[in-house]
Image (cartoon, rainbow, N blue to C red):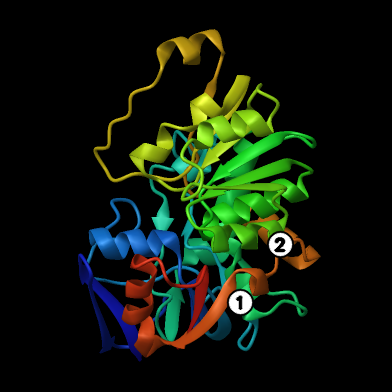
Amino acid sequence: MLAAVLYGKEHLSLEQVPIPSIGPGELLVRVRTALTCGTDLKVFLRGYHARMIVPPALFGHEFAGDVVAMGDGVTRFQVGQRVVAANSAPCLQCFYCLRGRVNLCEDLLFNNGAYAEFIRIPARIVERNTYEIAEHLTYEDAAMAEPLACVSKGLEDTGIEAGDKVVVIGVGPIGSMFVRLAKLRGAQVIAIGRRREKLEHTLHLGADRVIATEETPDPVGAVRELTGGRGADIVIEAVGKPETWRWPMAMLRRGGVVNFFGGPPSGTQLELDSDLLHYSEITCKASFHHTPRAFRDALDILESGGVRAVDFVMAHEPLASLSNVLFRLIEGCGPLKTAIIP
C-alpha cells in the first residue's frame, strides 16, 4: 500500500509498504479520508512528538474508513462496516487511570498511520475507543471526532457555563472548534487572530466579536473594552506561542479561568504576574489530549449536527499531495483542514 512515512524534521516520504497484518482483537481499516491536523503539522516541523510518535513511523491520526479484516475475538464489528477510531486508548489500571485521569495514563497507547490506504487498529483501541459511524454522517464528519474530542475536554476543563464571556486566542482548526463549542454552550465569544479573513469565518461559526491583531496593537485592551472593563470569564489560548501565552491572565476578570491549550515547543519558559495570579484568584489550567468519554461526546455533537465537517474541511487532495499540503499550511496559506483521500 501507499503510505506516508515520517523520518524526521520536514522529512516525509510516500512509500510502498506492506499492508499491516493484524492479530487477535485488531481491525484492518481501509482509510476513506484522513484530515490534516495542527498536531501533525507540529510533528512534521519538529520531526517527532515525545508522546505520540517517534520516527521513522507511519504518519497521521485523524481518519475514518471501512473494516476490511478482523482479528480473532472481534465481535463488535463486521467487515464492510464504516468506523472511526480514536488515536489512543488508556490502560485503565495505572495510578492516573484509577483516579479518573485517563488522558494522563502511564501506558497510553497511541496509534498512527492514517495517511495511508490501510491502517491497523490495535486491540485496546478496538475495545475502548472505536465506533460505528452513524448513517447520516460522512467519513469527513466522523474523522472530525478526534480533534473535537480534544476541544470538548478542554472546554469542559474550564467549567464553562451559559452566559460566560469566553475569549479564544487563535483561529486555526482547534481555535475555530473552541469558538463553535463555546457558542453551543451558550457563551458570548470573542475570537482573536491575526488575519481578518480567518476571523470572518469564526463569525459564521458563532463568534460574537472578533479582534484582528494585524489591526489592533493592544488585544488585551480590546478585550477589556468589549467586556466592560472587567475582563473575560474564560480565556483559551489555542496558538501555542510564548507571546500569546502572556495575554490571557491580563484579559481575565478576577476569579477567571485560563486554559493554556496550545503547546509551545519543549523547554519554553513563561513568566507570570504573581500579584495578579494571587490577588485575583486566577485559575490556570492546561488540557492534554482526550479521553474515550470525550471522544464519544464529540461523536454525539457531530451526530446532532452541532459541528459539521463542511465548516472546517475546505479542500480535498490525494495522498500524493500530502507534503505540498503541509508546506502550504506552514506558509499560512492553506485551508483550515484538508481531507487527504488515499
Find residue 132 and report its image quarter: bottom right
Residue at horizontal 46 percent and vertical 32 percent from the top: 247
Element type where label 2 sits in the image:
helix
SS at circle 1: helix
Q: Is residue 253 left or right of residue 243?
A: right
Mark 1 residue type: Glu
Where 342 sits versus 6, above or below?
Answer: below
Q: Is residue 331 left or right of residue 175?
A: left
Q: Position of residue 315 (x, y in %)?
A: 53, 81
Q: Which residue is mark 2?
A: 204
Q: Is residue 275 above or below residue 334?
A: above
CA–CA distance in space, label 1 to label 2: 20 Å
Whether residue 71 is visible, yes or no, is no
Residue that badge 1 annotates: 140
**Quick one: 108 or 329, which is closer to the camera?**
329
Which mark is in front, 1 or 2? 2
Q: How many marks?
A: 2
- Which comes before the other along the chain, label 1 or label 2? 1
Point out residue 224 in the picture as x, y percentages from the top left corner: 61, 28
Label 2 Cα crowd, 10 Å radius (few <14 / some 14-19 / many 20+):
few
Residue at 58%, 74% (x, y): give it.
Answer: 313
Residue occupying the point 66% across, 58% down: 298
Q: Examine the rendering and report whether any part of residue 5 can be seen.
A: yes
**Amino acid type indicated by mark 2:** His
Horizontal placement of 341 versus 14: left or right?
A: right
Q: Position of residue 175 (x, y in %)?
A: 55, 52
Q: Is residue 24 left or right of residue 166?
A: left
Image location (x, y in percent) of residue 201: 63, 63
Give the camera-side residue of 138 and 292: 138
